[in-house]
Image (tube, rainbow, N blue to C red):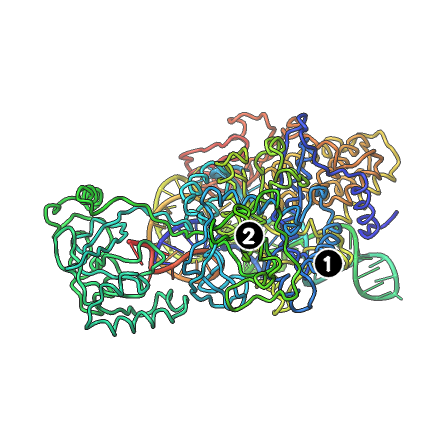
Amino acid sequence: MKRYNPKDIEPKWQKTWAKRDIYKAVDFDEKRPKFVMLTEFPYPSGEGLHMGHVREYTLGDIVARYKRMTGHNVLYPMGYDAFGLPTENYAIKNKIAPQVATEKNVANFQKQFDSLGYSIDWSRSFKTTDPSYYKWTQWLFLQFFKEGLASQDEIAINWCPKCKTGLANEEVVNGRHERCDTVVEKKYLKQWILKITQYADRLIEGLETVDYPSRIADQQINWIGRSKGAEVVFAVEERKDAITVFTTRPDTLYGATFMVLAPEHPLVSKITTESQKSDVEQYVTAAGAKSEIERQDTDREKTGVFTGAYAINPVNAEKIPIWVADYVLMGYGTGAIMAVPAHDERDHEFALKFDLPIVRVISNDASDDECTHDEGVMMHSGTYDGIRSSEMREQIVADLEKKGLAKERVNYRLRDWVFSRQHYWGEPIPIIHCEKCGAVPVPDEQLPVELPPVDHYEPTDTGESPLAAIESWVNVDCPKCKAPAKRETDTMPNWAGSSWYYLRYYDAHNDLAFADRKKLEYWGEVDLYLGGMEHTTLHLLYSRFWHQFFYDQGLVPTPEPYHARRGQGIILAEDGTKMSKSKGNVINPTHIIDQGYGADAMRLAIAFLAPYDQTTPWSNEGVAGTFRFVQRVWTLVQEYVAAEPEVNDAAEKDILVATHKTIKKVSEDLYEMNFNTAVAALMEFTNDLYRIKAKDSFAAKAAWKIAVESLIQLLAPYAPHVAEELWEAIGNEGSVHLSTWPIWDEAYLVADTVTIVVQVNGKVRDQLSMPANATEEQIIAAAKTSEKTQAYVEGRQIKKTIYVPGKLISFVI
RNA sequence: GGGCGAGUGGCGGAAUUGGUAUACGCGACGGACUUAAAAUCCGUUGGCUGAAUAAGCCUUGAGGGUUCGAGUCCCUCCUCGCCCACCA
């Protein structure tokens, strides 16, 4: 008998599958239901695939294979998200073109992909850096531009001094650039902006129509941060200026005892009085010099300075001082607040420090000197005294609105998307700047605007991309008026190409459109999208925004891109910490395969490890375990093949019951994505078959045939190579992966005998094996007379008997 | 400070949603095979008391409650993880 050695079978089948092209997705196949399985495409770094990739793609592959075997026309595609900083940095360091570095890395990734046995339709693959792809990224950008959703503005942006580029709000985590951990700075730059805030409500509402886990939906809703409130106008005393504030608590207006402007607020310099001028200027300069991290530190003591000016509270005409303080942020609301120290903790702290008046306007359970934001009954609020604060909230805005001093408003935490990067390795923004015509889109027939070759890829300190140095490329004629004009030299962020890539899989090689409408309609929504939780407020949000806009433009047939989203957990190192190069605890999936475990054992180990969405440490011993399991299956099937045919039907019933039980369990688990318990069920099944074999050898050949075939088929999504090899070994024609998934027969799952648990006062005292058709009376009688139960029941009064059919009897004494 | 989630053997994790807690795997221990080891195969393996594979008690982060019965439901508390955060 041949021993199980993955090296003998895995490369062989990988080649055969590629040659026979068995994983090809068929456009317009109407006979079978379609299923689009998507996993996030990788960034082809120099390091190759890591465990996180392998978990995601393996689980995706298991689902894709299962769906294929259940009769679906499956599209499981893969591509490369290749623009971005790591490749650019690599190119700078090694003085090679990023195009060349990308080719090299992609070739390496491809080799690794092949060795894992994924059922990907590679005919639809592409890189976001292919001009034939980014032609359409540019074209789609121009649709935003034409609708006024992409524009260039000079605004304060987050700037990474190390990467020398502007960043989107989503890329800044705790004041640092999420990629390189450098503290970001504020910088005023002319930047391209995508107006994602215009889709804020749609991005929230759309979540109700899709199947996302609540933690993903909640996180997006949280990030968008919709809050309902009102804008209220405060006049500045003895001036024509007015300060508009945003508040979610207009009910506390009578308690506003001062106002605070952000240091960057344009009114600061205008309203500051002569005597306060130097203090205010000093404060504003100092605030500007602080890093975002310092600014955002909530433990910091409040600072601020009085402007010398006063505002008039519109509800009671009271004169209240206007302060400047950096706890008010220019980027949220209007950059100015009305301060209500009695009902807002930050204002409270500020008032205490600077000895400002505190006026309580809501009466509730809180003690007098306590700051409380709870609801209650109004006080010190003129004619509103005595009504509920929640009622007051609506009324006061309506009343002020009549005087033009307030209006309802919704505010978002979400910021518009800073979309330009001052780097070489990205899609050029297809705009030409003409002195006369302004920003002019590059005409469709001139797309793509290809990246020109340059000598130096280094970013500059000036906020200009290296493309600006290539005069022959920059200087062009205006497409409109033919006057001399200049190309936009900023490029798009790495999130651009990934915002629509799934659509390209539907029609990867189309030169006339980003995808053919009929193909978009045929494939429709992505049925299942598996990816990392870390993309919830980045890629996932961005691509939903793009898709919703495309839908509005009539470019795509569905309002949302992904029907169901699932996030897989992180695989930690064996010591339970995050894998990292610096700690030297990185597990390389390729090594595991090469060590002799093979792809099948590794795929099983990944599936078996834990629920897919759980963060869990990796275990090398775990792969050893799944390898042993594959080996046991291998040996069992080989022995079955070699066994002499018999006609004895000794264990037929046991074999078929185990088989159908397992088919049911594995099918249901796969449907629910409970990969770990499905593998456990396959292991149990194998153990059962070994037990039956030990007792009766391979008698009941007919039943064994069903059992072995089912085992191989159920195993196929997890361990595709060994399943294929064994499928052939038992004499089947064609691929197991194109065979029909077995169906269980409930008839085998109805047991003749059931185990009834006997409890006395809630404690288990005995188990009875009873015929399945035994009546309640028979079971109670048996329970009462059982030897073990008697010791507890004898001589006592049974107060109550509970009978759960087929499960238990409980006596209360 | 706000939102979400989780605490079960030495470890990763099961538990039909209120009905035999610890499936499956790892590790460990014992045995078979072997000159020996690896590999493989067969056992045992939550804790305590017991010679026991007799019997009993205890056990799902802690404490209380509901129930004939709670890992599962309710209340209080503790710990950990993720996301957001001077967001007005």
Position in image of residue A393 (x %, y %): 22, 45
Left or right: residue A463 compared with residue B78: right
Q: For numbered disc 2, what is the local secondary structure?
A: loop
Return the chain for callout 2. Answer: A
Mark 2, Cα crowd under 10 Å, few <14 / some 14-19 / many 20+, is: many
Structural distance between the alpha carbons of marks 1 and 2 = 26 Å
Q: Earlier in the sequence, mark 1 or mark 2?
A: 1
Residue closer to the observer: A229 or A244 = A244
Position in image of residue A434 (x %, y %): 50, 52
Which residue does the numbered mark 2 point to in the structure image?
A429
Residue A682 numbered mark, or none: none
Left or right: residue A418 compared with residue A264: right
Q: For numbered disc 1, what is the local secondary structure?
A: helix
Which residue does the numbered mark 1 point to in the structure image?
A104
Q: Is residue B14 above or below residue A734?
A: below
Name of the residue lying farthest toward the left: A383
Looking at the rendering, in which quadrant would you find the C terminus of chain A? top left
Position in image of residue A411 (x %, y %): 34, 48
Picture quadrant where residue A562 is located: top right
Residue A790 visible somewhere in the drawing = no
Return the chain for callout 1. Answer: A
Mark 2 residue type:
Ile
Q: Is residue A720 above or below residue A538?
A: above
1 vs 2, front mark: 2
Mark 1, Cα crowd under 10 Å, few <14 / some 14-19 / many 20+, is: some
